[in-house]
């Protein structure tokens, strides 16, 4: 089945210790998104890639970086995690704007990050 | 004013009840309106979408958009315990989704 996969599902890191979260997709979608979702809050878009074009949200802290080495993979790097970065991180994909059903985003199961 | 506002609940109903979930939005230019369902510790999945105004029905679920009042609704008929989840409304703004905070629904047997 075509899907969005996130690894690991649970990640514990120490305050200030860099961490990388991984997302892969078998849908061959052009667009990949990273969201941060804190408890009982709406998913908040951090950034997205349209192919290799990186689009950062204005209020995403510099502490958050991303890489997309190819169509299938996308990584979220948190350079110096703080306690406030503990959250669920969701990866999503979609077709390019203008393509059929491009409005639909497909989400992975998320990575729950704990910062100690 | 937030772009999308949603009553967070929680909402607890008996099996078989009709459930009404609602959101309001601020920008009249929005055209695509979605409902996502998110089970505990899982990613959201698209339940229904509506383009512009009107109703859309899919089995026990009906999505409704009233653009004049900037109000979107999701109705669930004959609710089941398996419907217990958080329901997020979302609006597509060009290529970005703007989510509401989600309403947590519990359907008890």
Image (tube, rainbow, N blue to C red):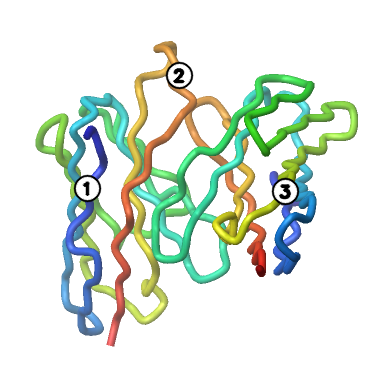
Measured from the top left, where is residue A88 in percent x and y? 38, 64
Which residue position is annotated with label 2? A101
The residue most toward the right is: B69
Q: Quadrant of residue B63?
A: top right
State the residue in front, A10 or A43. Answer: A10
Q: Quadrant of residue A8?
A: bottom left
Residue at horizontal 66%, vertical 69%? B108
Height in image: A58 above or below B80? above
Name the residue: 65% across, 31% down. Answer: B33
Task: Identify the image quadrant of the N terminus of chain A.
Answer: top left
Tag of residue A64? none
Q: Chain of mark 3?
A: B
Residue hosting label 1: A5
Residue A10: % across, % down: 24, 71
A58 left or right, relative to A8? right
**Is the C-beta separation of discs 1 and 2 under 8 Å?**
no
Q: Is residue B12 above or below residue A61?
A: below
Q: What is the CA distance from the residue labelled 1 to the residue labelled 3?
A: 33 Å
Q: Which residue is mark 3?
A: B78
Query: A84 or B51, which lies in front?
Result: B51
Of residues B76 and A93, the one drawn nearer to the viewer in this rendering:
B76
């Amino acid at each position: 089945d075509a899907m969005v996969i996130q690894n690991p599902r649970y990640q514990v890191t120490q305050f200030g210790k860099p961490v990388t979260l991984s997302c892969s997709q078998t849908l061959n979608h052009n667009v990949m998104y990273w969201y941060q979702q804190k408890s009982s809050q709406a998913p908040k878009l951090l950034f997205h890639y349209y192919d290799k074009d990186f689009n950062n949200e204005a209020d995403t802290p510099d502490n958050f970086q991303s890489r997309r080495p190819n169509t299938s993979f996308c990584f979220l790097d948190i350079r110096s995690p703080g306690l406030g970065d503990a959250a669920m991180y969701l990866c999503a994909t979609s077709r390019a704007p203008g393509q059929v059903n491009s409005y639909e985003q497909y989400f992975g199961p998320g990575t729950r990050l704990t910062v100690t | 004013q937030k772009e999308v506002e949603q009553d967070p609940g929680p909402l607890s109903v008996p099996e078989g009840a009709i459930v009404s979930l609602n959101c309001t939005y601020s920008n009249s230019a929005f055209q695509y309106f979605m409902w996502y369902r998110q089970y505990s510790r899982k990613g959201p999945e698209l339940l229904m979408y509506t383009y512009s105004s009107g109703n859309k029905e899919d089995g026990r679920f009906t999505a409704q958009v009233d653009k004049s009042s900037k109000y979107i609704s999701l109705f669930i008929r004959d609710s089941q315990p398996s419907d217990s989840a958080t329901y997020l409304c979302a609006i597509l703004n060009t290529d970005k989704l703007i989510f509401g905070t989600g309403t947590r629904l519990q359907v008890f047997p």
